[in-house]
Image (cartoon, rainbow, N blue to C red):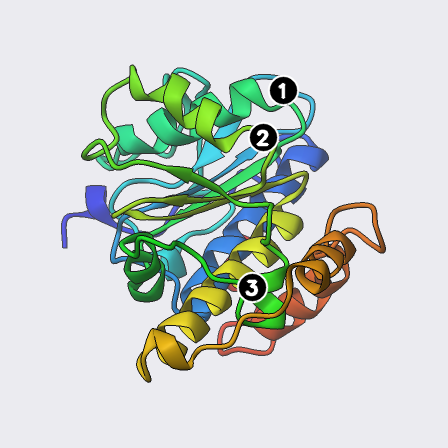
Amino acid sequence: MNTRYGTDFPSLRDQVAPEEWRARRDLAACYRLMDRYGMTDMIYNHITAQIPGKPGSLLINLYGLLYKEITASSLVEIDLDGNVLRKPDTDYGINRSGYVIHGCIHRARPDVHCVIHTHTRAGMAVSAMRGGLLPITQTASRFHGHIAYHDFEGPAIDLAEQDRLVRDLGPHNAMILRNHGLLTCGASIAQAFNLMYQLEMSCRAQVDAMAGGLENVALPGNEVLERAAHLYQPGTRRPYGELEWHAMLRLLEAEPGGYPSYDA
């Protein structure tokens, strides 16, 4: 294989601030977890994270690596307009859709530090359903009244779409891109991952339940759904994702290759 398209990158651990290194390792771990839970699409899609102490600077994946190959040092630093500020010495670049979708959300939502976008089978299936996500499970009730929708405009390469993406997302942290896929964001990488995991599980359960016919699917009452959704909102009980994150890192560390596989 041409080494310019390899996956062995020199470590940046001693070349960046400790805060940036922690963000890099957490983001690399998030990519690995997305692969672990079957939420990848070959080399496509993105997860972005703000770099602490560097306003307007994001970390994003190289376009060409599998999620399970991503390490802390392979991540690319870009600005909100998609200009590359720092990347490994490789012929891999970045995918334009990454900053078209992600950059505008980071710019418009200072509370958002991580954005995740997927093209999973279940997510795409629900995105194509007229009724969207149905609150038919406890997991899905989390999104009742707290999920946005954005109509399909073709592959996200047109900068003019950014205003509509931001408008449709509004104050929500989860969005279904109709006929396309899923998107979540959060105040941390841990929170955005937890939200995407729950949204994906909701979509999988819905696809399974609807296999028996929509007429056989039961919906809880609106009062119950509103109460359930409220209990899952940030700040109501705890910031969902933070406690779980430590368990997720232990899961990665227990796999062959362990911790060094992404913290490199």
- Judging by the rendered image, the residue that carries numbered circle 1 is 54
Q: Is residue 41 above or below residue 87?
A: below
User: In the visual, does 114 lie left or right of 242?
Assistant: left
Question: CB atoms at circles 2 and 1 under 8 Å apart?
Answer: yes
Q: Closer to the camera, 128 or 34?
A: 128
- Residue 135 position (above or below residue 127): below
Q: Nearer the viewer, mark 1 or mark 3?
A: 3
Of 150 and 92, the residue lying toward us: 150
- Tell me where residue 80 appears, x and y as whole percent: 46, 18
Identify the residue shown where x is 73% and y is 49%.
233
Cα–Cα span, label 1 and label 3: 35 Å
Q: Secondary structure at mark 3?
A: helix
Q: CA distance from mark 2 to mark 1?
A: 8 Å
Give the residue number, with chain letter if any, for mark 3: 140
Q: Position of residue 182 (x, y in %)?
A: 40, 49
User: Which numbered tag is attached to residue 50?
Assistant: 2
Looking at numbered disc 3 in the image, what kind of residue is underneath it? Ala
Q: Position of residue 60 (x, y in %)?
A: 43, 36
* Element class at badge 1: loop
Q: Is residue 259 visible?
A: no
Number of marks drawn = 3
Q: Residues within 10 Å of mark 1 (few under 14, many from 20)?
A: few
Q: Residue at x 29, y 15 (%)?
A: 160
Q: Nearer the viewer, mark 2 or mark 3?
A: 3
Q: Secondary structure at mark 2?
A: strand
Compared across the picture, whether 129 is left or right of 220 comes to left
Above or below, comparing residue 243 to residue 24 in the picture: below
